[in-house]
Image (cartoon, helix red, strand yellow):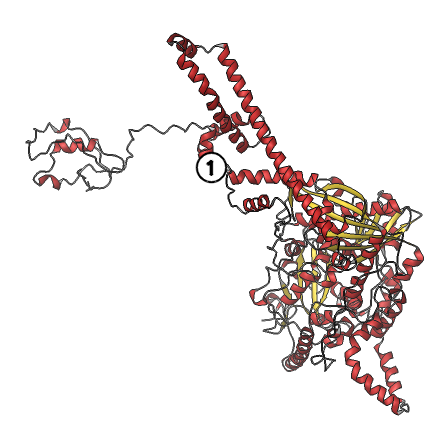
Amino acid sequence: MLRTSLRSVSGPSSRHVCLSCLARPGALGLRQFHRISALRTNSGETKLEANLFDASIEPPAPLPPNSQIPETKDGASSKPQKSSRPPDSPRVLTAAAWAQMSKPQRKNYKYRHHELYNKFKQSLLANREISLKEAVELEIARAKMAEQGAAPLETALSEATPSEATLSQEAPSEAARVEAEKIKALQQNIMATELEARRERKAKFKAERLANAKHEAKMLKGKEKESQLEAEIATDGPADTSAASEPKKAVNLKSSNVVAQILEASSENGVAIPNEPSFNSEREEKEEKEEKVKEDVWLSEDRSQSLPFLEDHVTSRDTGSLNSKDKSLQLKEVRTPMPPVPRVAFGLDRVLFNPGVYQLRDPRSLVYNFDPYLDQIMPVSEFDFDTLKPYVTSSKDVTACEMTKKHEKKYYGSSSSMTSVLSHFHYLLSAWRPVDTSKLTQSYGDPLRSFTRLLRAPTAMFLRYNEKEDIYAIDADKEYDTANILMHLGKSMEKQLTLPKEKFERYRRSDANKITAEEEASVPESYHYSTIGKFLMRSQLDAYDPRLPGTGMFDLKTRAVVSIRMEPAEHQRGMGYEIRRRFGKWESYEREYFDMIRAAFLKYSLQVRVGRMDGIFVAYHNTERIFGFQYITLEEMDEALHGTSNTELGDTEFELSLGLWEKILDKATAKYPKQSLRFHFETCNGPTPFMHIIAQPVTEEQIDAIQSKNQAQVDAITERLFYPDRFENCEATESAEPKPVSPKENTEAEADKKTEAKSIGDSLADALFPIDPADSTVEQSAEPEYDTSFELPGLNPDSKAASKPKRKPKFVPNPELSADYDENLLAMTLVITNKVNGVPVDRPGHFTQSDKWTIDYELDEIDVVRGNYVLQAIKRRRNLVLRKNVQDHSNDFFANLQRLSEKGRAFRKRLNKIDRDRGILVYKDSCDMDV
């Protein structure tokens, strides 16, 4: 084959070609060249036919005139050559052809031949409620059956006479038509039978699994119950594992159908099962079928099997479902006259529109970005807290009570009294979703992704009945409340951030123009009221800016540094700790932000939602000075809590949580009508997260006794904080009067000094929370199960050398021996299943407004004996976490905080010396500066 290469001489549109090859002996003549040009393709390739003759053998023929030479086109011409091949006709689409196509081929066919694809799809589905894959499979099976049924018919036709065959081809007889209809009906019956058989096999397999699980639970039940009770009830939140880790299904070796389990596990992991018909779309088809099977299994199976230890204790069961499209569960605003809400002072509104931390003073140039007056915090001993209005609890709020009655609601509460319970609903609905720490820098290391132990602890509340209005108020349980400096600084610093300097100084005790309590009481408080279902919620408003989205409201939060938060009762020890940098594990804003994610963001986000606010304004301080400010929006908090900045997921979870809470309160008030109740809530972690709820009828006298249990200690600590001079004078007077000391007393004093450091942590806790004699059955010994010597580090010189105490055996409550045994309590267990758009999920992910979130719940009532076991275990866990102030850190952690506090004090001394020598520099706009 000869290949001819033509090169353009005068450009793509020129007809001049280089024919130097014609001068060689044996080269083609001009006539042969014209014949070759007529055979050229678009790619420039030339294929010579076998009958071409060689110019070296036969002389060339005479050339015609130029006008008679046909015009030719070469491969370099700019004009496209028309292909002689007709365009490809679309492929006839059949069920067999569709099954043989790969996924890209199907996608390409849909795009290029959309109309033919729609016709093919409509012809297969024919208004049947099946998927396209199922219709293709049915059509293929039908074609196979038709081939098998048509074989006898063809044989009969071949044996017939030619005339009969011709007649049958032209017009089929009535018998042939009837036979074809019979074959078609037979095919449909076979396919229907096959589908029904598949469903029966799946249902039988599910039933075998449930029976095996039930059998195993009964086998394990033969062990001693008392050794298992704590293991069954106890929980301390989720383990600090990665969010991607999920529990794996274990193969039940006791089951007789082990092979079926292995094959099912293999199919879920994408491994092909032998002897199974496979198509290119088999995996997609299986995924759709599994989704339908999961939904059917939820409706059919007994959910108590997921909690086998409760199987024999359930006395009644309530089931139902809630969904995000229910209009009664949507947050609604209650419009009421509202006094003006204060705005931030000192130009702090700049912080609202700048993401990240806005430092009060630049650490490099030492220039103040705001008024240096904010650098110093007014001590609590100088601020007159007596002039402030007292906090009004929900049960004593007359306005909220009247509005609840007016809007025909049944329950009302405040943001502070409802957030602790709503936090446990978040754990349940999100299946203990780990927090998102992706905003932290890589230098921070591998942080914990669980909530703090204090936040995971069981919570309690009171549902106080108002007999006059026939409604219920939600009050927080204050059994373990105590006083510390942070509670009071939050009130005083709120005034400092929203009032001008002159007005704020009037709250100082020594000020000549000090504000009076009557003048302060004349300024009304501002609240937002909202409703969801049967709830009316109240939220106090701290600050406002009309430029913010939504209502423009935001909450003020004063955030103490880590050294103060870990030891609020001994805040003087951590006052030297300073924030000196943006990033890092210590002395940084990143450290404080990470602690807020684990300990405060959940509570803050719920308060923002109750108050229909935009975000929170955070002031970082160490109780002595302010370091910086940060405005954190609700979207930013949701990104850390829910993994998405779209607030739709958090809003929907908030509404559904209140819907579940309403079901629980309705069940309790129906059993104990027109009575006040005390509730305990705890969400337990496990393969199937669930919630324990205990309700107990209480009288008003019992409520007051519990709420004022630590009031004497709170008053004593508050007085010491407000009037430290009184106690210093008393101590000086006592030390100035020496007393004779006997040798025995001297020896005892020395022994007390040696053990003082060892027991100071427990003595401080005992001073704040004395042991109640009634709790002796709950906690047999004052020594806790955990080592609490780390609560006040550095005071025990023998802590390293001391041997670890022997661990006590697990707590096993005995209701028969307990004085707190309640025969009239209501114990419930709540189990849920999340569904997004009808598909069961562990937890919703990227949720949007168009999605539908459905919660199928099961509220089981358990017997009284088991309920008392659960109640005692909950009280004990709550007592250990709240009373002894157990932290998530070791002794080395607190020792490091003490070292950093001393380092910060030295740094502050050097900085003060620089200020005295150089003076204080304050930021000022260059337009306002004198040239």
Q: In front: 135, or 71?
A: 135
In the foreground, 511 or 706: 706
Q: Report how many numbered discs are placed on residues in the image.
A: 1
| Quadrant position of the N terminus in the picture | top left
Q: Secondary structure at mark 1?
A: helix
State left or right for residue 363 relative to residue 169.
right
Choose top left, top right, bottom left or bottom right for residue 296. Answer: top right
**Going 91% across and 61% down the picture, which residue do you hit?**
705
Query: Can residue 440 be seen here?
Result: yes
Is residue 613 at least partly visible in the picture?
no
Say which residue appears at 80% left-offset and 71% top-offset. 783
The image quarter in which residue 906 lies = bottom right
Q: Residue 795 location in percent, x, y?
A: 74, 80
Q: Is residue 873 left or right of residue 284?
A: right
Pick whichever, 513 or 415, lies toward us: 415
Q: Residue furthest top?
A: 163
Quarter of the figure that contains the C terminus: bottom right
Could you tell me which residue is drawn at 79 percent across and 48 percent down? 312
Tag 1 residue: 107
Give the crowd class for mark 1: few <14, some 14-19, many >=20 residues within 10 Å.
few
The three-letter amino acid code for the residue at tag 1 is Lys
Q: Which is more toward the observer, 812 or 286? A: 812
Q: Is residue 563 above or below residue 875?
A: below
Determine whether 438 is above or below 206 in the image. below
Image coordinates for residue 448, horizontal then vertical, percent: 64, 63
Residue 790 appears at what percent x and percent y?
Answer: 73, 74
Q: Where in the figure is residue 900, as x and y percent of width and height? A: 66, 76
Relative to 368, 866 lies left or right: right
